[in-house]
Amino acid sequence: MNILLIGSGGREHALAWAIAASPLTDRLVIAPGSDAMATLGVCVDVNIEDHDALLSLADDEGPDLVVIGPEGPLVGGLVDRLEAAGHRAFGPRKAAAALEGSKEFARQACARYNIPQPGFTACKDMTSVRAAVAAAGGACVIKADGLAAGKGVVVADTADEAIEAAEAMLGGRFGSAGSTVLVEERISGPEASLFALVDGPTALFIGSAQDHKRAFDNDQGPNTGGMGAISPAPRLDEALQQQVMDQIVQPLASGLAAEGTPYRGILYVGLMLAATSPQVIEFNCRFGDPEAQVILPRLRSDIVTAMLATVEGTLANLSLRWANTHAVTVVMATRGYPEQYGKGSAISGLAEAERAEGTILFHAGTKIGHDGQVTAHGGRVLAVTGLGDNPASARATAYEAVDCIDWPEGFFRTDIAAG
């Protein structure tokens, strides 16, 4: 099979790694890809925001399957355009991808299908924000409705913090993504992420992980796209997994299909394991980053076969297998992330880091020069993944590899998967 993968980050590096290893893959084209992905496929420099160019590339390449990694093209309707042109694409159409593109849409869907979630109020002005914050008692969660690269969420301890965050969002901090803000009830409990393949009416569990969103140790600092993850999620046992599939994923899949907007692709369910029941924090319409870097290395079934079954609507006939291992990934980021940061700092020691058994390095924001010199050109730059028989050994493997990497301008959390 010829496969076209769209994206350039750490998630896409993990997807390219898994797709390239499939016995079904004859040729892998990655747009735009990265220097680190060039060993796995043919990279073509196309801007993922240029849907016309991506469609032309698909027409020229004639892939048997197009796999879309990031949320932007999915929310923007790229799958609709690819399918209209006769291409098979792995990922939801625009109407279903609104689960990630609009938090208000996702909350309303949960309300329609009786899916457990915190209370919420959607607000378009500060008058309604102040009323909603007061009703919540001050401590609440403020979210930008649209895509904000994982940074449009503020967990506020006081009414003043909540109002300040909402003012910034409505004032244009995230552009049109903040034209509506959600004021949500603040719930507590361990967090976990569950991933499922959905082919319309059928949903199939594919993995779980626990992400670490805050920038610094002990969950301090601003929210980020993710500073590390562990899989399986330590607190999401088989009974809870089944409860989430039965009470959240399947009702969502069935409801969207019945309404004529079937979901097809990978569904990410961000969960708070509250005392009453697991509750939905958010949905994403693609693999998480860095969750993909811990879930895909544990999957023993062929990812391309699973993607084809999703696209063709045959998930009911598919079963998946996982390695009896745990995985931990530690994200190394440029100092200053998630705010302002520099580019071009040198990174060394990567070859030594990768030599250890059970270690995989996924690149999220690097460039590799002709002399082999690796430099940082992003906020989150590397995801260092360690595999082990238990969480402690996987964590030790990951941090041993991190210790091999010499990058004075980088930083990382030291407590990923610590408890």
Image (tube, rainbow, N blue to C red):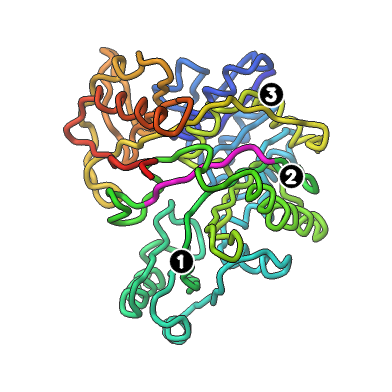
Which residue lies at the image location 32% right of the left edge and 21% below the top edge?
A: 368
In front of the other: 268 or 129? 268
In three-dimensional space, the C-alpha distance between marks 2 and 3, rounded to whole angstroms, equals 29 Å
The C terminus is located in which quarter? top left
Disc ID at residue 203: 2
Q: In this view, does 218 lie to the left or right of 140?
A: left
The type of residue carrying mark 1 is Lys
The picture places residue 36, in percent across and down from the top left corner, at 40, 22
Helix, strand or loop at mark 2: strand
Between marks 1 and 2 in the image, the one whose residue lies nearer the viewer:
2
The picture places residue 53, in percent across and down from the top left corner, at 56, 35
Magenta region, residue range: 205-213
Q: Is residue 375 left or right of residue 89?
A: left
The verdict on residue 275 being magenta is: no
The type of residue carrying mark 2 is Ala
Between marks 2 and 3 in the image, the one whose residue lies nearer the viewer:
2
The type of residue carrying mark 3 is Gly
Disc ID at residue 143: 1
Which residue lies at the image location 35% right of the left edge and 32% below the top edge?
A: 382
Where on the picture, by quarter, is residue 88? top right
